[in-house]
Image: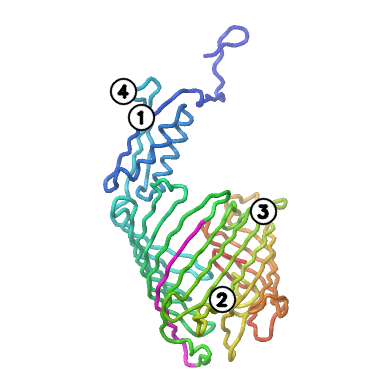
Amino acid sequence: MSKSPNGGSSPRDPNSKYDLSKINARVDRVNVSGLLRTHNDYVMRAAEGLFKADNFQQLMLEAMAAKSYLHELGIFKDVSVHIDISRGADASPQGYEVTLKGKEYTRIMGSAGTEIGQNEGSLRTELTIPNILGRGESISLQGSYSSTRANDLQLKFWKPFFHTRFRENRPEISFSIFRQTDRYDISSFQTTNLGYLLDFSAHTMLGVDLTHSLQYENSIRDVGLLNKSVPFAIRDHSGPKLASLLRYSLIFDNRDASVFPTRGFLLKSVNEYCGLGGNIAYTSSTAHGEMNVPLFAGLVAQFCARVGVLKETKKTTVLPINNLFYCGGPLTLRGFKYGGAGPVIDGTPIGAQTFWCTGAHLWTPLPFAGVFKGLASHFRLHFFYNMGNSNSFTTDNMRSAFGLGLAVKLAERARIELNYCVPVRRQSTDKVLNGFQFGIGYEFV
């Protein structure tokens, strides 16, 4: 009860709030239960922030941070937090005891579902043995099948180091053995890669959050023909070859959403040097950029660009055909078929050593988005203008197209586009698509 101005009593305002930061508190003991296969030292850092709390508000925030940390370790499928008054001879006056109850993953997990690639969907299955050595190490067997382009089989072992003092950098190492098949129907060949991959990834936060990945790949790349009428310029690439390469990728992403962002930037680069061994040698660099600017009434202006360069080295005899760049299609240059805006040999499109493409978009919500808020948030309309070229960084012989379309969000990872495209500039050998074009992927220009 509280006193009223006239001296009587009045009930406490139900909307009043307690300031938990003024309640003294300290943590006397932290318990982590549910550890079956996990070593104690792997979860000890979860308690560090709790022991620094000196009021109840900070205690609750640190408890939630500890719960999030245990989830990041990849050993628990569920974690609950219990806060109780500290009891016993060693209990302090404002002491509390925090218990983090975790439920570890089962020894073997399996999953099956669909996976979205770049203009393709595939059926994916995975069998995983998590936390096999007690400190987050896991092994998985993954397989994917697509009726259009790529099939993949991979055995992967990975180990995170989130429990170390480098937690904020999120370091992780992995080793994979893989077999991957890619079909290039437009050029009438396919590649089968069999090899292994070493990967080290980490984050750095020197002013901005950057994601780094350094990989070493050693693989046998076998180029096969899809029919008997393939031009000789493509036949010369057929047969197995050994590739040994280093790959470095860098990503900066501060967008507020990955599918329909309203603000922020995305910068991504991938650089390869092949020629550490084997009989394939080249250097390859690709970069992708995206800028989003909010306007008014839900309108968003978006500007995208992508560029790629494939160069010879002193060891190069011939550049591998499967590393050439294909410009055209719903993900790069709308209004053209996949690979349809590039060089042609004997009537067959073939990739280019360099390419660039840009896109300007005006994104808008559906006209009646306010009525169907939940459903309408998965849809957007956009007006676009694309430009690009192959084997030339000038605007000479440039290709371009404009149009409008409807985009649908898929699970915060990818989107589907149905666009009506009007090619503006083209070359006589290009394969254009004047009208509706369907695209699905996670990285568009």
Does dot 4 land on a helix, a strand or a loop?
Answer: loop
The reply to whether the magenta stretch includes residue 213 is yes
Task: Sort mark 2 into few (<14), some (14-19) or many (20+) by Cα contacts within 10 Å.
Answer: many
Q: Earlier in the sequence, mark 4 or mark 1?
A: 4
Give coordinates of residue 68: x percent, y percent. Answer: 43, 43
Look at label 4 and name its amino acid.
Answer: Asp
- Choose the circle earlier in sequence order: 1 or 3: 1
In whole angstroms, how far apart are the C-alphas of marks 3 and 2?
A: 47 Å
Say if the magenta span includes residue 134.
no
Colouring chosen for the image of the structure: rainbow
| CA distance separating discs 4 and 1 | 12 Å
Q: Amino acid at mark 1?
A: Glu
| Amino acid found under the numbered disc labelled 2 | Leu
What residue is shown with label 3?
Answer: 368
The CA span between labels 1 and 3 is 52 Å
Q: Secondary structure at mark 2?
A: strand
Labels 3 and 2: the sequence-earlier one? 2
The segment highlighted magenta reads 211-228
Looking at the picture, tell me which residue is in the foreground, 205 or 96: 205
Indicate whether 276 appears above or below 126. Answer: below
Residue on which the image places disc 4: 90
Residue denoted by label 1 = 97
Residue at 54% of width from left, 63% of height from top? 442
